Image (tube, helix red, strand yellow):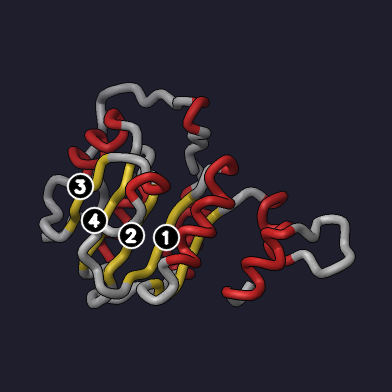
Amino acid sequence: MRADKPPAFTRQPRQNKRLGQVFLKDQNTMHKIVDAATLSPTDQVIEIGCGEGWMSFELAQKCGALAIMELDPYFLQMTQDRLAEFTHVQYFPGDALKTTLAPIPFERFKMVANIPYQISAPLTKLLIASRERLIEAVLLVQLEFAKKLVAKPGSDGYTSLSLYTQFYLET
């Protein structure tokens, strides 16, 4: 059974700046991210960092299986409560950068996420290491990081990360 809108959550959310948590509040941007993934009921999706669970709810409505990895137990519980009616959602507590994506049982997957700046580079490297399983990644990252990914040789923003990602990925 799928709902039209997620149930309200009564606890007051709090951000953990140490974890780089920045929550996506703009519904239009969230819908653009989810729509960019062109999800179908057969897609298996991983979301890193569910935050308050609003994008998780949208993803759960459109995909066949959703795996959510979240480091903060507070927000993992909030999202589990918000998505309680969805039986095709699995939760993986912990740091995706330390556990890797190995515990997630999807043979092939799409990743959709809003990524904090401080984990953007290591997560990109993790995705490259998992590229044989990765179908597509739709990530909202900070503009400064995105510029590094697409920087051309000789430009100010060109770094070893630029070279590395452009070698392995279509940017």
The residue identified by callout 2 is: 46
Question: Do residues under tags 2 and 1 come within 8 Å of each other at their CB atoms?
Answer: yes
At horizontal 31% and vertical 74% (from top left) the residue drawn is 108
The residue identified by callout 1 is: 112
The residue identified by callout 3 is: 83
Question: Do residues under tags 3 and 1 come within 8 Å of each other at their CB atoms?
Answer: no
The residue identified by callout 4 is: 103
State which quarter of the image contains the N terminus: bottom left
Disc 2 residue crowd, few under 14, some 14–19, many 20+, Cα 10 Å: many
At horizontal 22% and vertical 34% (from top left) the residue drawn is 77
| Residues at marks 2 and 4, CA–CA distance in whole angstroms | 11 Å
* Residue 126 x, y percent position in the rendering: 46, 58
* Residue 141 x, y percent position in the rendering: 58, 52
Q: Quadrant of residue 133?
A: bottom left
Question: What is the three-letter code of the residue carrying label 1?
Answer: Val
Disc 3 residue crowd, few under 14, some 14–19, many 20+, Cα 10 Å: many
